[in-house]
Image (spheres, rainbow, N blue to C red):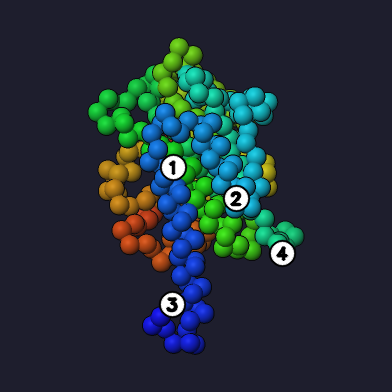
Amino acid sequence: MTGFPDRDRAAAEKGLNRGRVIADAQNFARDLVNEPSNKLTPKILAEKAQAMAKEAGLAVEILDEKRIADLKMGALLSVAQGSVEPPRMVVLTYTPANLKPGAPVIGLIGKAVTFDTGGISIKPSDGMEKMKYDMAGGATMLGVMRALAALKPNVKVICVVPSTENMPGGRAQKPGDIQTAMSGKTIEVLNTDAEGRLILADGVHYAKQLGATHLIDAATLTGAIVVALANINVGVFGSDQPFTDSSSPAPKPPGKKCGRCPSTTTTASSSRAP
C-alpha cells in the first residue's frame, strides 16, 4: 500500500482486508443468485454451501428430505411436495474461540426457493424467469457466514437455510390445504404463492431449537415491497427496535437503503386467520 503515513498503514491494511473479505462474500452470494435454476437445485445449493463451509472452517449439517420429514417440518415439505427436486435444509455454525457462557446466539435464516412458479396459484408467465432469484435471501445469509468465518467476531452465529422449489405438480399442495409446521402450529394455505413464510416458519423454529436467541431472516417474500419502497430499498420489519436498528447496515452502503416498515400489534392481528 502506498500513500499512507506509517502511523496509519496498519489501520489502512486492516480496513482493506476487511473490505476484501466482505466483497468476496458478496460476490459469492451474487454468483449463487445468478445461477439458472436448472444449475442450482436445492441439492446443488446445499452442496455449494457445504463446500464453502468446509473451506471457511464452519461447522455444517445438511438435512435431506428424510431428515426433514423425521423432524416434522411439514411447512417446508408442503411447498416441496409439488417438485421432483427434493428439499434441503442447510445449517452452518460459526463458534468463536472465546465464547462466553450465556452470551447471545444470533440466528440467521434465509429463504432459498431455487425456483418459484407460485405453485397451483401460478404466477403470470411474463418475467417468471426472474423467479430463480427467489433464493437470494438464502444466498445472502450464506455470504454472511463466509464473511464471519474470516472476520471472526466474538459471537456465535447459527445459519439456517431452508431450500426447495415451488412447482405446480400433481402432488402439489392446493389452496385451502392445512399444513402442520415443525412447531406444531397449523397453517391454512390460501395462496400457494405465499410459500416463503411456510419454509421460514420451519427454518425459524429450527434455529430456535438449535439455541438462537436473536433472529434475523432475509427473504424475497413479496414484490409488493418494491411497490412500496422501489427496487433500491430493503424493507425491514422488526419486533425489537434497538436490536433491529443495530442489525440494519450502518453505515448504509451506497445504492442500498433500509426502509423501516410497520410491525405493530394491529398489523400482526390483521394477518391472523379468523
From the image, tell me which residue sits under label 3. 1
Give the amino acid type for the residue marked by disc 2 in the picture.
Answer: Glu
In the image, 169 versus 204, the foreground residue is: 169
Percent coordinates x, y for residue 189 in the rendering: 46, 24
111 lies above or below 144? above
Percent coordinates x, y for residue 269 in the rendering: 46, 38
From the image, tell me which residue sits under label 4. 98
Marks 3 and 2 sit apart, C-alpha to C-alpha, by: 28 Å
Marks 1 and 4 sit apart, C-alpha to C-alpha, by: 32 Å
Looking at the image, the residue that sits furthest to the left is 126
Q: Residue at 38% x, 83% y: name it.
A: 3
Which secondary structure, mark 4? loop
Task: Give left or right: position of 40 versus 53.
Answer: left
Q: Which of marks 3 and 4 is in front?
A: 3
The mark that comes first in sequence, 3 or 4, is: 3
Contact check, label 1 and label 2, Cβ < 8 Å = no
From the image, tell me which residue sits under label 2. 55
